[in-house]
Image: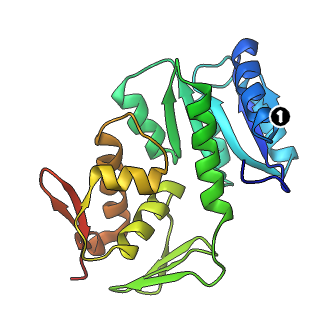
Amino acid sequence: MVFEMDRLKILVVDDESRMRKLVRDFLVKSNFDVVEAEDGSKALDLFFADKEIALIILDVMMPKMDGWQVCREIRAYSKVPIIMLTAKTDERDELQGFDLGVDEYISKPFSPKILVARVDAILRRTKQISQDDVLQAGGIVINKAAHSVEIDGKPIDLSYKEFELLSYFLENRGIALSRENILNNVWNYDYFGDARTIDTHVKKLRGKMGEKGDMIKTIWGMGYKFEEN
């Protein structure tokens, strides 16, 4: 585990106590602190009372307030990374999750080891940022330390994964990037999904970039390439 000196705190939200215990045990073994909530309402109370929560693992189907509602409430105030857990495999649910700014989306049943690897990957990326790491291309300025993006001097609001994706494109401008390459580098773990995840993020990223979104070129049958217009 990378953070031996700094035990980061994870909020686990699930109405099944057995599932919470399973996830908690694996996280604690990986040197994380864990707080738990059995419903959405308690999750919000805990989150707003504790400023040290570094990441949320959030079940979709819960009594009182479902995971989507919880995500909306939190996203109104915070960009804390959120991993959604769901028993459904409906593509519409996955797309809704990305629309709400969910960073990862995992369907039950899942491997706790894979879940912990994803938690670790997100937190490692958010913690290991060079303070002077600024990327610029075609009027786009990315400040990795401040986690901010400006296009022609105007700030744009990106989700965590959109920010990582745009950073990766700028770091590899002019290079054809396969979907597999993007998954391995941006998602930073062995991903067992399909290309829809990348395509969904690219579509949303292009939309937020306005006309600058045309710099992300589609390479049919392969992936994408970032080129300054």
Q: Is residue 153 among what the camera can see?
A: yes
**26 and 44: which is toward the camera:** 26
Point out residue 58 in the picture as x, y percentages from the top left corner: 64, 32
Q: Of residues 158 and 130, which is closer to you in this image?
A: 130
| Disc 1 target residue | 35
Amino acid tagged 1: Val
Q: Is residue 162 left or right of residue 212?
A: right
Q: Which type of secondary structure does the marked residue at label 1 adopt?
A: strand
Question: Where residue 117 appears, x then y in whole percent?
Answer: 59, 40
Q: Residue furthest left?
A: 220
Q: Which residue is drawn at 49% across and 51% down?
A: 188
Q: At x 42% / y 39%, what residue is drawn? A: 191
Q: In this view, does 205 lie above or below 119?
A: below
Name which residue lies at 50% across and 44% down: 100
Left or right of 34, for residue 224: left
Query: Picture quarter containing residue 60?
Result: top right
- What is the x, y in percent for residue 5? 85, 56
Q: For residue 114, what is the image quadrant?
A: top right
